[in-house]
Amino acid sequence: MRARSRLTRPRPRVLFPRSNNSNTATSNIRSNTRMASAARAPQPDVELSIPPLFTTEPLIRDSLPTESSRVQDATIDEVLPFLQGEEFDYCNFHGVPHLDRRLHVKFLHKQLGKLPAAFTPADPSRPWFFYWCLSALVLLGEDVTEYRQRLVDTVRPMQNQDGGFAGGFGHTSHLATSYATVLSLALVGGQDAYEAIDRRAMWRWLCSLKQPDGGFQMALGGEEDVRGAYCAAVIISLLNLPLELSQDSPARSAGHTGLFTGLADYVHQCQTHEGGVSAKPGIEAHGAYAFCALGCLSILDSPHRSIPRHLNVPLLISWLSSRQYAPEGGFSGRTNKLVDGCYSHWVGGCWPLIEAALNGPGSGPGGEEANSGGHALPAAKGSLFSRDGLIRYILCCCQDQSKRGGLRDKPSKYATWWPCF
């Protein structure tokens, strides 16, 4: 291993946009707002309070250059100017720009409009487009009920008589697109949205996807993986479907009687030797599948009981911790992969569930202790990952700083829907 030289250039200072000398009322308001911000913010001759961990190159790197190490080095070179506050007209004392809510809201509303012809090949993914946008708008505090009727009219033709929603009209029903559609209808709310779902047909279809090993196929005759376990659990829970299996379900051959029977055991089999969770037993661990596994188990029972009972929590924490890089601050989805803005959700969303598993009723006096592999788990104190690092990556590197708005994978990428979600 060889040491890597530190950056010697001085740290950047807070930059203030020059005021507009226009005499209009709007300009005066903006000017006053900027002066008020300047009064609260540090003066230009004050250094930013930026943790060195997130502003300097790693001290050590692999002595054997490979394609993976080269693209990793290139990514660090790409994000460092943003993390050091050099790419912004204004940032706060910590070197972080504000979340530009107005631009992101405008970007998301635009994506819910008419899409260009280039998106025709992505027609089977339409439910994901409107789910990502609606979910992000709700997180930003927007009222999305205006989209209720349009959404209902859009998804009705996607629902098949045999149950479930497809990605488009005439396509095969799929658990992923059914998950996105059901959640989108829940987001817009209302009786019309609820009644658009054929619950009886959905139940029969889910029973046909239930497999003898406890898991779920994503579509009839399709792949079986931990996504199916999570998507099915969410749909069953939200729609309050009966748990008893139909008599013709394939899972009956293994003695299963319910939709949730054997599901936790299937999830358990997907944990790998690294500690992460793979799509199915025996393959590579992935951050999104870890989220699906934890989410599924948290629906089946209280996290402090279900997660430690079916997963090796210390090993999982070790693997999840390894997904956060410095100086980037963001998460990668797999071992030896680059950081990506979308894993702020998939990996970042694992931590509250892990903390719920560690800090359940057992954390209080007389409560039930979380237990993994016969060993009591300690309560999580503070944060199990660097929240500061993740916030910095999202606000500094993932925000599209142009007038277009939206969020992206990293600064060199184009803003899209899923990083916003």
Image (cartoon, grey):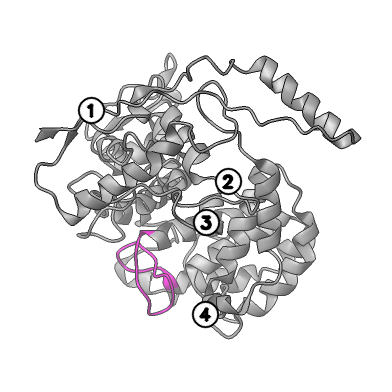
- Residue type marked 1: His
User: Which of the two residues, 174 or 235, is positioned nearer the viewer here?
Assistant: 174
Is tag 4's residue or tag 3's residue first in the polypeptide sequence? 4
Residue 147, percent across and down?
A: 76, 61
The alpha-carbon separation of the residues under discs 2 and 4 comes to 29 Å
Q: Nearer the viewer, mark 1 or mark 2?
A: 2
- Residue type marked 2: Gln
User: Which of the two residues, 15 or 182, is positioned nearer the viewer here?
Assistant: 15
Q: Which stretch did the figure color magenta? A: 209-226
The alpha-carbon separation of the residues under discs 1 and 3 comes to 38 Å
Residue 359 located left or right of residue 8: right
- Residue type marked 4: Pro
Residues tagged 4 and 1 counted as in contact (Cβ below 8 A):
no
Residue sitting farthest toward the bottom: 170
Is tag 1's residue or tag 3's residue first in the polypeptide sequence? 1
| Relative height, residue 178 to residue 397 (above, below) | below
Residue at 61 percent across and 37 percent down: it is: 99
Is tag 3's residue or tag 2's residue first in the polypeptide sequence? 2
Is tag 1's residue or tag 2's residue first in the polypeptide sequence? 1
Residue at 42 percent across and 25 percent down: it is: 359
In the picture of the structure, the residue carrying the numbered disc 2 is 401
Q: Nearer the viewer, mark 1 or mark 3?
A: 3
